[in-house]
Image (cartoon, rainbow, N blue to C red):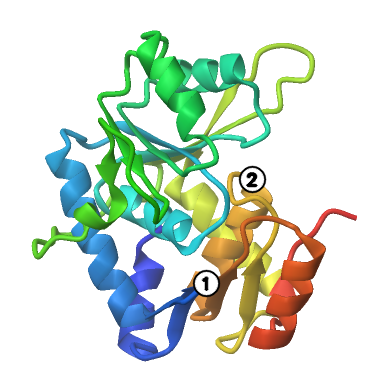
Amino acid sequence: MYITQALKRNVQLFPNKTSTAYLDRSFTWQESLERISKIAYSIKKLDISIGDRVAILAHNSDRYFEFLYSVSWAGAVFVPINTRLAPPEIEFWINDSESKLLFVDKNFAEIVINLKKENKISSVKNIVYLSDDACPDNMINYDDLITSETTEDALRGYDDLAGLFYTGGTTGRSKGVMLSHTNMVVDALNCALMGNMGENAKWLHAAPMFHIADCAGLFGISQVGGSHYFIPGFIPKLFFEAVNKFKITETILVP
């Protein structure tokens, strides 16, 4: 069992079906696989080796989806950071995980810039900027990761570490929970089965993508060849507009 296996299956069965849609961007499963293999190539060129940690601090988007699969494709370990944390907590998560590469969007760029300026996240060697506006100095524009070069899937799987998901830390410091590829795939299959999802499923990522609950849906929808749609977070107006526009069939929300 390995996370990226679903991508290859979907390219074989549904190459021209929508894989992701966000704002005015839309990609098929064939296009997503190509982009992911290119981003994984660039991640490796940034001195990320097998098992290295790569963190992300951002709101929901199609690029969050690409991040999770690209990191896995490169053989590294993804570290989703809670967007509701205070700067000292963000600093702790990054340092505790020893993340060498960090992806960030405009909402959190200033926090990261300040932490880096104060040398508080010394393990981070490079920062990738996810948003479409002007890329800050000393960061790498996300689009620059989409090169003409690709890389083969590292084929990490089974008991290999896939991701570090940190606990809330309400009674002390957060603890990094080590989840394997088998953990993630079995969770995805359970989610798909429990939700009676099929290849026509359309999942709206409204819950935060740093949370394991939405990740179960993300990998679950990919397992069955469904389609992913994104809004930055649960904003009622955006939520109902997306449901109406894309005819969403699946999502997960907090009661």
In the displayed structure, 132 sits above or below 134; it is below
Which residue, given by chain and number where applicable, does mark 1 sit on?
A: 23
For the residues carrying marks 2 and 1, which lies nearer the camera in this image?
A: 1
Identify the residue under disc 2.
211
Q: Where on the picture, by quarter, is residue 203? A: bottom right
Label 2 neighbour load within 10 Å: few <14, some 14-19, many 20+ = some
Q: Is residue 153 visible?
A: no
Residue depicted at 39% across the width and 59% down the height? 66
Q: State the count of labels.
A: 2
Residue 113 location, quadrant: top left
**Classed neighbour count for the residue bearing mark 1: other residues with Cα under 10 Å, few (<14), some (14–19), many (≥20):** few
State the quadrant of the N terminus.
bottom left
Give the structural element (helix, strand or loop) at label 1.
loop
Q: Give the residue drawn at x 9%, y 61%.
A: 149
Q: Alpha carbon of mark 2 to alpha carbon of mark 1: how far? A: 22 Å
At 59% from the left and 89% from the top, the residue drawn is 200
Q: Position of residue 77 (x, y in %)?
A: 37, 39
**Residue nearest the viewer, comparing 134 with 244:** 134
Question: x, y percentage for residue 37?
Answer: 22, 62
Does the image show residue 49?
yes
Residue type at mark 1: give it.
Answer: Leu
> On the picture, is 144 further left or further right than 53?
left
Image mark for residue 152:
none
Q: Nearer the viewer, residue 214 or 178?
A: 214
Task: Pick the quarter of the image with the C terminus.
Answer: bottom right
Q: Quadrant of residue 235?
A: bottom right
Residue closest to the eye, 108 or 224: 108
- Name the residue furthest left: 149
Sequence-earlier tag: 2 or 1: 1
Residue type highlighted by circle 2: His
**Residue at the far front in the pictured view:** 134
Q: Could you tell me residue 136's position as x and y percent? A: 33, 37
